[in-house]
Amino acid sequence: MVLAVGIMSGTSLDGIDTALVEITGVLEKTRVKLVDFATKPYPKELLNQLHHALEAESVTVQQVSSLNFQLALSYAAVVKELCEQNQLTTGELAYVASHGQTLFHQPETLGDFPPSTLQLGDAGVLAQLLQCTVVSNFREADMAVGGQGAPIVPFADFYCYQGNKDRILQNIGGIGNLTWIKKGGSPADVVAFDTGPGNMVINELTRHFYDEAYDHDGKHAANGQVLPELVNHWLSLPYFAQPYPKTTGRELFGKTFVAKIIGENFEIAPDDLIASATMLTAKSITQACAQLTTEPCELIIAGGGAYNPVMMAMIRQTVDANFIVKTQEDLGFSSDAKEAIAMVILAQHTLQKIPNNVPSATGARKPVVLGRVTWA
Protein backbone atom coordinates (compact mmCIF):
# COMPACT_ATOMS: atom_id res chain seq x y z
CA MET A 1 0.00 0.00 0.00
CA VAL A 2 1.40 3.39 -1.00
CA LEU A 3 0.18 6.98 -0.76
CA ALA A 4 -0.32 9.01 -3.92
CA VAL A 5 -2.10 12.19 -4.98
CA GLY A 6 -4.22 12.66 -8.08
CA ILE A 7 -4.68 16.14 -9.57
CA MET A 8 -7.57 16.91 -11.89
CA SER A 9 -8.51 20.24 -13.45
CA GLY A 10 -11.22 19.82 -16.03
CA THR A 11 -12.98 21.72 -18.79
CA SER A 12 -15.37 23.46 -16.39
CA LEU A 13 -12.47 25.43 -14.83
CA ASP A 14 -14.23 25.28 -11.47
CA GLY A 15 -11.04 24.51 -9.57
CA ILE A 16 -8.17 22.12 -8.92
CA ASP A 17 -9.23 18.77 -7.47
CA THR A 18 -6.69 16.85 -5.38
CA ALA A 19 -7.26 13.37 -3.96
CA LEU A 20 -4.94 11.73 -1.42
CA VAL A 21 -5.27 8.01 -2.03
CA GLU A 22 -3.99 4.74 -0.59
CA ILE A 23 -3.47 2.32 -3.47
CA THR A 24 -2.15 -1.19 -3.92
CA GLY A 25 -2.09 -3.75 -6.72
CA VAL A 26 -2.81 -3.56 -10.44
CA LEU A 27 -5.56 -4.78 -12.76
CA GLU A 28 -8.04 -7.03 -10.91
CA LYS A 29 -6.03 -6.65 -7.70
CA THR A 30 -6.24 -2.86 -7.71
CA ARG A 31 -7.51 -1.53 -4.40
CA VAL A 32 -7.93 2.16 -3.59
CA LYS A 33 -9.05 4.10 -0.54
CA LEU A 34 -9.72 7.83 -0.53
CA VAL A 35 -7.90 9.38 2.44
CA ASP A 36 -8.70 13.04 1.80
CA PHE A 37 -9.96 15.30 -0.96
CA ALA A 38 -9.97 19.03 -1.63
CA THR A 39 -11.06 21.40 -4.38
CA LYS A 40 -9.32 24.74 -4.54
CA PRO A 41 -10.34 27.58 -6.87
CA TYR A 42 -7.79 28.88 -9.31
CA PRO A 43 -6.10 32.15 -8.34
CA LYS A 44 -8.24 34.84 -9.96
CA GLU A 45 -5.54 36.17 -12.29
CA LEU A 46 -4.60 32.65 -13.42
CA LEU A 47 -8.27 31.85 -14.07
CA ASN A 48 -8.61 34.98 -16.20
CA GLN A 49 -5.54 33.98 -18.20
CA LEU A 50 -6.94 30.47 -18.72
CA HIS A 51 -10.25 31.83 -19.95
CA HIS A 52 -8.40 34.12 -22.34
CA ALA A 53 -6.21 31.30 -23.67
CA LEU A 54 -9.22 29.03 -24.20
CA GLU A 55 -11.56 31.59 -25.68
CA ALA A 56 -9.44 34.16 -27.54
CA GLU A 57 -8.98 33.86 -31.29
CA SER A 58 -5.22 33.79 -30.79
CA VAL A 59 -2.68 33.56 -27.96
CA THR A 60 1.07 34.05 -27.97
CA VAL A 61 3.64 31.33 -27.37
CA GLN A 62 4.83 33.36 -24.37
CA GLN A 63 1.33 33.25 -22.84
CA VAL A 64 1.08 29.47 -23.30
CA SER A 65 4.56 28.92 -21.89
CA SER A 66 3.81 31.11 -18.88
CA LEU A 67 0.54 29.27 -18.20
CA ASN A 68 2.39 25.95 -18.34
CA PHE A 69 4.64 27.04 -15.46
CA GLN A 70 2.00 28.96 -13.50
CA LEU A 71 -0.32 25.95 -13.45
CA ALA A 72 2.50 23.76 -12.12
CA LEU A 73 3.06 26.27 -9.30
CA SER A 74 -0.65 26.21 -8.44
CA TYR A 75 -0.79 22.40 -8.57
CA ALA A 76 2.22 22.16 -6.27
CA ALA A 77 0.65 24.57 -3.77
CA VAL A 78 -2.59 22.58 -3.47
CA VAL A 79 -0.75 19.25 -3.16
CA LYS A 80 1.45 20.67 -0.39
CA GLU A 81 -1.62 21.98 1.44
CA LEU A 82 -3.41 18.62 1.19
CA CYS A 83 -0.34 16.81 2.51
CA GLU A 84 0.11 19.25 5.38
CA GLN A 85 -3.50 18.70 6.42
CA ASN A 86 -2.68 15.00 6.69
CA GLN A 87 0.66 15.43 8.50
CA LEU A 88 2.66 14.37 5.45
CA THR A 89 5.48 15.80 3.42
CA THR A 90 5.21 15.60 -0.35
CA GLY A 91 8.42 13.59 -0.38
CA GLU A 92 6.55 10.77 1.40
CA LEU A 93 4.25 10.33 -1.60
CA ALA A 94 5.00 7.45 -3.94
CA TYR A 95 3.95 9.65 -6.85
CA VAL A 96 1.66 12.45 -7.99
CA ALA A 97 -0.63 11.79 -10.97
CA SER A 98 -1.44 15.02 -12.79
CA HIS A 99 -3.91 15.24 -15.66
CA GLY A 100 -2.99 18.84 -16.43
CA GLN A 101 -5.25 21.54 -17.83
CA THR A 102 -6.34 20.81 -21.38
CA LEU A 103 -5.67 23.86 -23.52
CA PHE A 104 -6.35 22.16 -26.85
CA HIS A 105 -7.65 18.78 -27.99
CA GLN A 106 -8.13 17.84 -31.64
CA PRO A 107 -8.80 14.11 -31.92
CA GLU A 108 -9.07 13.97 -35.71
CA THR A 109 -7.24 15.47 -38.70
CA LEU A 110 -8.55 18.89 -39.67
CA GLY A 111 -7.24 20.20 -42.97
CA ASP A 112 -3.44 20.27 -42.79
CA PHE A 113 -3.43 19.68 -39.03
CA PRO A 114 -3.02 16.11 -37.76
CA PRO A 115 -4.57 15.04 -34.42
CA SER A 116 -2.97 16.66 -31.38
CA THR A 117 -3.59 17.49 -27.75
CA LEU A 118 -2.01 19.84 -25.22
CA GLN A 119 -2.27 19.70 -21.42
CA LEU A 120 -0.50 22.37 -19.36
CA GLY A 121 1.09 22.19 -15.91
CA ASP A 122 4.76 21.32 -16.41
CA ALA A 123 5.67 17.99 -14.82
CA GLY A 124 9.35 18.89 -14.40
CA VAL A 125 8.49 21.99 -12.38
CA LEU A 126 5.94 20.02 -10.36
CA ALA A 127 8.36 17.18 -9.58
CA GLN A 128 11.05 19.56 -8.35
CA LEU A 129 8.68 21.61 -6.22
CA LEU A 130 7.20 18.49 -4.61
CA GLN A 131 10.37 16.38 -4.61
CA CYS A 132 8.51 13.30 -5.76
CA THR A 133 7.81 11.40 -8.97
CA VAL A 134 5.14 12.87 -11.25
CA VAL A 135 3.15 10.94 -13.85
CA SER A 136 1.45 13.17 -16.42
CA ASN A 137 0.40 13.48 -20.08
CA PHE A 138 -2.01 10.56 -20.28
CA ARG A 139 -3.46 11.27 -23.73
CA GLU A 140 -0.66 11.45 -26.31
CA ALA A 141 0.32 7.77 -26.48
CA ASP A 142 -3.25 6.73 -27.30
CA MET A 143 -3.41 9.30 -30.10
CA ALA A 144 -0.08 8.06 -31.45
CA VAL A 145 -1.72 4.69 -32.21
CA GLY A 146 -4.83 6.11 -33.83
CA GLY A 147 -6.97 6.75 -30.74
CA GLN A 148 -8.78 9.95 -29.84
CA GLY A 149 -6.84 10.35 -26.60
CA ALA A 150 -10.13 10.28 -24.73
CA PRO A 151 -11.82 9.14 -22.68
CA ILE A 152 -9.02 7.94 -20.37
CA VAL A 153 -11.07 7.29 -17.22
CA PRO A 154 -12.73 4.01 -18.43
CA PHE A 155 -9.66 1.95 -17.53
CA ALA A 156 -9.99 2.98 -13.89
CA ASP A 157 -13.77 2.67 -14.03
CA PHE A 158 -13.57 -0.96 -15.12
CA TYR A 159 -11.33 -2.10 -12.30
CA CYS A 160 -13.25 -0.11 -9.67
CA TYR A 161 -16.82 -0.88 -10.72
CA GLN A 162 -16.94 -4.23 -12.51
CA GLY A 163 -19.35 -6.65 -10.86
CA ASN A 164 -22.48 -8.73 -11.18
CA LYS A 165 -24.62 -6.03 -12.81
CA ASP A 166 -24.49 -3.67 -15.78
CA ARG A 167 -23.32 -0.20 -14.84
CA ILE A 168 -22.98 3.08 -16.68
CA LEU A 169 -20.67 5.58 -14.99
CA GLN A 170 -21.66 9.08 -16.09
CA ASN A 171 -19.44 12.03 -15.23
CA ILE A 172 -20.90 15.52 -15.54
CA GLY A 173 -18.05 18.00 -15.53
CA GLY A 174 -17.65 20.68 -18.18
CA ILE A 175 -18.31 17.91 -20.70
CA GLY A 176 -20.40 14.81 -20.00
CA ASN A 177 -18.81 11.40 -20.53
CA LEU A 178 -19.90 7.86 -19.80
CA THR A 179 -18.38 4.41 -19.33
CA TRP A 180 -20.56 1.33 -19.85
CA ILE A 181 -19.30 -1.72 -17.94
CA LYS A 182 -21.16 -4.86 -18.86
CA LYS A 183 -21.91 -7.57 -16.32
CA GLY A 184 -19.22 -10.23 -16.57
CA GLY A 185 -17.40 -8.29 -19.30
CA SER A 186 -13.71 -7.64 -19.89
CA PRO A 187 -11.89 -4.35 -20.56
CA ALA A 188 -12.27 -5.09 -24.30
CA ASP A 189 -16.06 -4.90 -23.85
CA VAL A 190 -16.02 -1.43 -22.30
CA VAL A 191 -17.85 1.30 -24.21
CA ALA A 192 -17.06 4.92 -23.39
CA PHE A 193 -17.57 8.29 -25.06
CA ASP A 194 -18.49 11.93 -24.46
CA THR A 195 -22.25 12.36 -24.28
CA GLY A 196 -22.08 16.11 -25.00
CA PRO A 197 -22.08 19.20 -22.79
CA GLY A 198 -22.09 18.67 -19.05
CA ASN A 199 -22.04 21.94 -17.09
CA MET A 200 -20.19 23.94 -19.76
CA VAL A 201 -23.16 25.59 -21.48
CA ILE A 202 -24.99 26.18 -18.18
CA ASN A 203 -21.89 27.78 -16.63
CA GLU A 204 -21.34 30.11 -19.59
CA LEU A 205 -24.96 31.24 -19.46
CA THR A 206 -24.87 31.94 -15.70
CA ARG A 207 -21.60 33.84 -16.12
CA HIS A 208 -23.06 35.94 -18.92
CA PHE A 209 -26.41 36.76 -17.29
CA TYR A 210 -25.57 36.77 -13.58
CA ASP A 211 -21.78 36.97 -13.27
CA GLU A 212 -21.91 33.67 -11.35
CA ALA A 213 -19.49 30.80 -11.95
CA TYR A 214 -22.25 28.18 -12.09
CA ASP A 215 -25.94 27.61 -11.36
CA HIS A 216 -25.70 26.85 -7.64
CA ASP A 217 -28.19 24.13 -6.66
CA GLY A 218 -29.86 24.63 -10.05
CA LYS A 219 -31.70 27.72 -8.73
CA HIS A 220 -31.87 29.48 -12.11
CA ALA A 221 -32.97 26.31 -13.90
CA ALA A 222 -35.61 25.79 -11.22
CA ASN A 223 -36.93 29.32 -11.82
CA GLY A 224 -37.02 28.83 -15.58
CA GLN A 225 -39.13 26.88 -18.03
CA VAL A 226 -37.71 24.24 -20.35
CA LEU A 227 -38.37 25.06 -24.01
CA PRO A 228 -38.67 21.66 -25.76
CA GLU A 229 -38.28 23.03 -29.29
CA LEU A 230 -35.02 24.71 -28.37
CA VAL A 231 -33.68 21.57 -26.64
CA ASN A 232 -34.62 19.42 -29.64
CA HIS A 233 -32.93 21.91 -31.97
CA TRP A 234 -29.69 21.60 -30.02
CA LEU A 235 -30.01 17.80 -29.93
CA SER A 236 -30.17 17.80 -33.75
CA LEU A 237 -26.52 18.84 -33.89
CA PRO A 238 -24.49 16.26 -35.87
CA TYR A 239 -22.37 15.35 -32.82
CA PHE A 240 -25.26 13.60 -31.09
CA ALA A 241 -25.86 11.34 -34.11
CA GLN A 242 -22.19 10.41 -34.52
CA PRO A 243 -21.29 6.81 -33.72
CA TYR A 244 -18.98 6.21 -30.79
CA PRO A 245 -16.15 6.33 -29.86
CA LYS A 246 -16.28 10.11 -29.98
CA THR A 247 -15.09 13.07 -27.95
CA THR A 248 -16.00 16.74 -27.79
CA GLY A 249 -15.11 19.87 -25.84
CA ARG A 250 -15.02 23.65 -25.86
CA GLU A 251 -14.47 23.61 -29.61
CA LEU A 252 -18.14 22.63 -30.04
CA PHE A 253 -19.91 23.57 -26.79
CA GLY A 254 -17.84 26.47 -25.47
CA LYS A 255 -18.18 30.23 -25.58
CA THR A 256 -18.88 30.42 -29.33
CA PHE A 257 -21.80 28.01 -28.99
CA VAL A 258 -23.22 29.97 -26.06
CA ALA A 259 -22.76 33.32 -27.82
CA LYS A 260 -24.81 31.95 -30.70
CA ILE A 261 -27.52 30.76 -28.28
CA ILE A 262 -27.73 34.21 -26.70
CA GLY A 263 -27.68 36.01 -30.04
CA GLU A 264 -30.40 33.86 -31.60
CA ASN A 265 -32.63 33.81 -28.51
CA PHE A 266 -32.31 37.32 -27.08
CA GLU A 267 -36.06 37.48 -26.46
CA ILE A 268 -36.01 34.40 -24.19
CA ALA A 269 -35.71 34.91 -20.42
CA PRO A 270 -32.25 33.97 -19.05
CA ASP A 271 -33.62 31.37 -16.63
CA ASP A 272 -35.54 29.70 -19.47
CA LEU A 273 -32.29 29.39 -21.43
CA ILE A 274 -30.52 27.94 -18.38
CA ALA A 275 -33.37 25.49 -17.73
CA SER A 276 -33.26 24.42 -21.38
CA ALA A 277 -29.47 24.02 -21.28
CA THR A 278 -29.85 21.86 -18.18
CA MET A 279 -32.36 19.68 -20.01
CA LEU A 280 -29.96 19.48 -22.98
CA THR A 281 -27.37 17.88 -20.71
CA ALA A 282 -29.92 15.56 -19.11
CA LYS A 283 -31.43 14.36 -22.40
CA SER A 284 -28.08 13.97 -24.13
CA ILE A 285 -27.12 11.61 -21.29
CA THR A 286 -30.34 9.63 -21.17
CA GLN A 287 -30.58 9.32 -24.96
CA ALA A 288 -27.00 8.00 -25.06
CA CYS A 289 -27.82 5.47 -22.34
CA ALA A 290 -30.95 4.31 -24.19
CA GLN A 291 -28.80 3.50 -27.26
CA LEU A 292 -26.60 1.16 -25.22
CA THR A 293 -28.82 -1.29 -23.39
CA THR A 294 -32.40 -2.29 -22.62
CA GLU A 295 -31.24 -4.58 -19.79
CA PRO A 296 -31.47 -3.59 -16.10
CA CYS A 297 -28.62 -1.15 -15.50
CA GLU A 298 -27.36 1.22 -12.81
CA LEU A 299 -26.69 4.76 -14.03
CA ILE A 300 -24.21 6.22 -11.54
CA ILE A 301 -23.68 9.99 -11.73
CA ALA A 302 -20.48 11.80 -10.70
CA GLY A 303 -18.98 15.24 -11.17
CA GLY A 304 -20.40 18.65 -10.38
CA GLY A 305 -23.70 17.83 -12.08
CA ALA A 306 -24.43 15.24 -9.41
CA TYR A 307 -24.92 18.14 -6.96
CA ASN A 308 -27.44 19.94 -9.18
CA PRO A 309 -30.85 18.68 -7.96
CA VAL A 310 -32.66 20.07 -11.01
CA MET A 311 -30.36 18.24 -13.40
CA MET A 312 -30.65 15.01 -11.40
CA ALA A 313 -34.46 15.32 -11.46
CA MET A 314 -34.38 15.85 -15.24
CA ILE A 315 -32.20 12.76 -15.70
CA ARG A 316 -34.60 10.67 -13.64
CA GLN A 317 -37.53 12.14 -15.56
CA THR A 318 -36.16 11.34 -19.03
CA VAL A 319 -34.26 8.07 -18.51
CA ASP A 320 -35.74 4.75 -19.64
CA ALA A 321 -37.36 2.51 -17.04
CA ASN A 322 -34.56 -0.11 -17.12
CA PHE A 323 -32.13 2.35 -15.48
CA ILE A 324 -31.74 2.90 -11.75
CA VAL A 325 -30.20 6.35 -11.22
CA LYS A 326 -27.68 6.69 -8.39
CA THR A 327 -24.82 8.96 -7.40
CA GLN A 328 -21.30 8.05 -6.34
CA GLU A 329 -22.32 8.85 -2.78
CA ASP A 330 -24.96 6.11 -2.94
CA LEU A 331 -22.05 3.69 -3.43
CA GLY A 332 -20.00 5.24 -0.63
CA PHE A 333 -17.71 7.18 -2.97
CA SER A 334 -17.23 10.87 -3.79
CA SER A 335 -18.71 12.42 -6.94
CA ASP A 336 -16.08 15.17 -6.82
CA ALA A 337 -13.06 12.93 -6.28
CA LYS A 338 -13.77 10.26 -8.91
CA GLU A 339 -11.61 11.63 -11.73
CA ALA A 340 -8.68 12.59 -9.49
CA ILE A 341 -8.71 9.03 -8.11
CA ALA A 342 -8.77 7.71 -11.68
CA MET A 343 -5.54 9.59 -12.41
CA VAL A 344 -3.86 7.75 -9.53
CA ILE A 345 -5.04 4.38 -10.89
CA LEU A 346 -3.74 5.22 -14.36
CA ALA A 347 -0.37 6.28 -12.94
CA GLN A 348 -0.11 3.09 -10.87
CA HIS A 349 -0.21 1.12 -14.12
CA THR A 350 2.06 3.54 -15.98
CA LEU A 351 4.79 2.96 -13.42
CA GLN A 352 4.40 -0.81 -13.82
CA LYS A 353 4.52 -0.45 -17.64
CA ILE A 354 1.04 -1.99 -17.96
CA PRO A 355 -1.10 -0.74 -20.89
CA ASN A 356 -3.85 1.46 -19.48
CA ASN A 357 -5.83 2.79 -22.41
CA VAL A 358 -9.09 1.20 -23.54
CA PRO A 359 -9.00 0.85 -27.35
CA SER A 360 -12.72 0.01 -27.51
CA ALA A 361 -13.38 3.44 -25.99
CA THR A 362 -10.79 5.58 -27.79
CA GLY A 363 -10.55 3.84 -31.15
CA ALA A 364 -6.82 3.13 -30.71
CA ARG A 365 -5.30 0.34 -32.80
CA LYS A 366 -3.78 -1.37 -29.78
CA PRO A 367 -3.30 -1.15 -26.00
CA VAL A 368 -0.47 1.18 -24.95
CA VAL A 369 0.99 2.57 -21.74
CA LEU A 370 -0.38 6.04 -21.10
CA GLY A 371 1.55 8.64 -19.13
CA ARG A 372 4.96 10.27 -18.95
CA VAL A 373 7.11 9.70 -15.86
CA THR A 374 9.16 12.61 -14.48
CA TRP A 375 11.58 11.93 -11.61
CA ALA A 376 12.43 14.51 -8.98
Image (tube, rainbow, N blue to C red):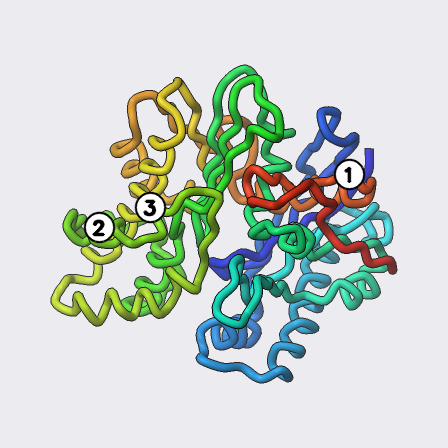
The one nearer the camera, 369 or 91, is 369
Query: Neighbour class for label 2 at 10 Å: few (<14), some, many (≥20)?
Result: many
Mark sitting earlier along the chain (1/2): 2
Mark sitting earlier along the chain (1/3): 3
Can you give x and y, in whole percent of width and height, for residue 299 in the image? Answer: 42, 29
Name the element at disc 1: loop
Is label 1 in contact with label 2 (beta carbons under 8 Å)? no
Q: Residue at x 54, y 15 (%)?
A: 164
Is label 3 in contact with label 2 (beta carbons under 8 Å)? no
Is 261 positioned to the left or the right of 70 in the image? left
Mark sitting earlier along the chain (3/2): 2
The one nearer the camera, 195 or 189, is 189
Q: Amino acid at mark 2?
A: Val
Dot label at residue 241 = 3
Q: Mark 1 highlights which residue?
A: 354
Dot label at residue 231 = 2
In this rendering, the label closer to the viewer, 1 or 2: 1
Q: Residue at x 53, y 44 (%)?
A: 336
Q: Amino acid at mark 1?
A: Ile
Q: Quadrant of the C terminus?
A: bottom right
Query: Neighbour class for label 1 at 10 Å: few (<14), some, many (≥20)?
Result: some
Whether residue 304 is visible to the viewer of this picture, yes or no, is no
Can you give x and y, in whole percent of width and height, for residue 282 in the image? Answer: 32, 42
The one nearer the camera, 160 or 87, is 160
Q: Residue at x 83, y 46 (%)?
A: 94
Q: Amino acid at mark 3?
A: Ala
